[in-house]
Image (spheres, rainbow, N blue to C red):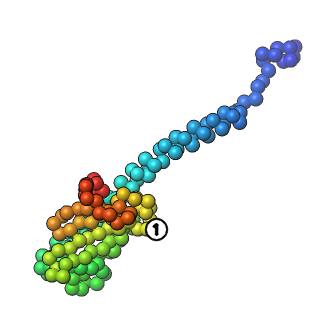
Amino acid sequence: MSIGSFPHLRRTAAGFTLVELLVALTVFAILSAIAWPGYAGIMHRAQRNDARLALLRLQHLQERHYATHLRYADRLGTADEADTLVTADRSDAGLYTLAISASEDGQRYTAIALADPAGRQRRDHECRQLSIDQTGARRSADDTGNWSGGDPLRCWR
């Protein structure tokens, strides 16, 4: 007896049809389109921690400088000069550039972390800049430079 006499025992081709493959790819594309923006938002929020830690470190260095010189430093640098904080001008992970400015009398300062325009945080449109001052007041600005008025701590959470 041959297999031809038993039609129900014939081998069928194993694998996916083109239609099944296209349906699977479509489902994958839809799920990716839904999940990717949420993932990117979570990553931006997590990487803001780099700016927060850098600003808190600058705040600590400013208080040490004030205790020694009775005025806040007005610039960042590598040399131990008057009114200079000896520290890098970038955050630890390099995602933010750091800057400080002090009042003329040296009694007030503002430290700012700005997302590097060539880095991963460049797409963080809500929280492009974070700042802290001598009183500990924390603020944030979006990518257009508008400082948040309603919820100044939204980027610090």
Please tell me in which quadrant of the rendered image residue 69 appears: bottom left
Q: Is residue 50 visible?
A: no
Query: What is the x, y in percent for residue 110?
Result: 23, 71
What residue is rendered at 40% in x and 59% in y? 125
Q: Picture coordinates of residue 47 (x, y %)? A: 37, 58
Q: Give the camera-side residue of 90 and 12.
A: 90
Side of 75 where 117 appears, left or right: right
Residue lying at 23% horizontally and 66% vertically, measured from the top left:
132
Residue 157 is situated, as x and y percent measured from the top left of the image, at 27, 53
Question: Is 23 situated above or below 89?
Answer: above
| Residue at 40% over, 51% down | 41
In this view of the protein, can residue 21 be seen by the observer?
yes
Q: How many marks?
A: 1
- Helix, strand or loop under label 1: loop
Q: Identify the residue position indicated by label 1 in the image.
A: 118
Q: Which image quarter is the N terminus in?
A: top right
Q: Is residue 119 left or right of residue 88?
A: right
Image height check: is 42 above or below 74? above
At label 1, the amino acid type is Ala
Instruction: Pinpoint residue 111: horizontal percent, then vertical percent.
Output: 26, 70
Against 80, residue 45 (above or below) is: above
